[in-house]
Amino acid sequence: MKEIRKLTPEARNNRLKEYRAQLSEKYAQLSAGGSIDDTGKITELRKTIARFLTIMNEEQNE
């Protein structure tokens, strides 16, 4: 969380886009009938995205 807070808003948005793209790729692999090497990666990506959104919402409400 501290690392996320240190990022500039533009960098945060870019990172968030990257994580969302990675998550959609993992979901696409699963829906195509394939298997992914690390199933915990989906959970990790979802939590990371939630952390980014939480921090961004906190800053908006301040």
Image (cartoon, helix red, strand yellow):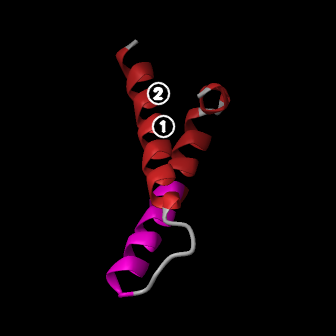
Height in image: 30 above or below 3? Answer: below
The answer to which quarter of the image holds residue 4 is top right
Q: Mark 2 points at which residue?
A: 55
Residue visible at 38% across and 78% down in the picture: 30
Q: Is 45 or 9 nearer to us in this picture?
A: 45
Examine the residues drawn in magenta and state their main secondary structure.
helix
35 sits left or right of 4 in the view:
left
The answer to which quarter of the image holds residue 59 is top left
Height in image: 24 above or below 10? Answer: below
Residue visible at 41% across and 30% down in the picture: 54
Farthest top residue in view: 62
Residue type at tag 1: Phe
Residue visible at 40% across and 12% down in the picture: 62
Q: Residues within 10 Å of mark 2 (few under 14, many from 20)?
A: some
Q: Are discs 1 and 2 less than 8 Å apart at CB?
A: yes
How far is mark 1 from mark 2, CA to CA?
Answer: 5 Å
Residue 40 — which label?
none
> Percent from the top left, x then y, of residue 12?
56, 40
Badge count: 2
> Percent from the top left, x then y, of residue 41?
52, 59
The answer to which quarter of the image holds residue 29 is bottom left
> Percent from the top left, x then y, of residue 57?
38, 27
The answer to whether residue 17 is visible is: no
The answer to whether residue 49 is visible is: yes
39 sits left or right of 7 in the view:
left
Q: Mark 1 points at which residue?
A: 52
Q: How crowded is mark 1: few (under 14 residues within 10 Å), some or many (20 or more)?
A: some
Q: Is 26 or 37 nearer to us in this picture?
A: 37
User: What is the span of residues highlighted in magenta in the rendered image?
Assistant: 19-33
Q: Is 34 or 16 nearer to us in this picture?
A: 34
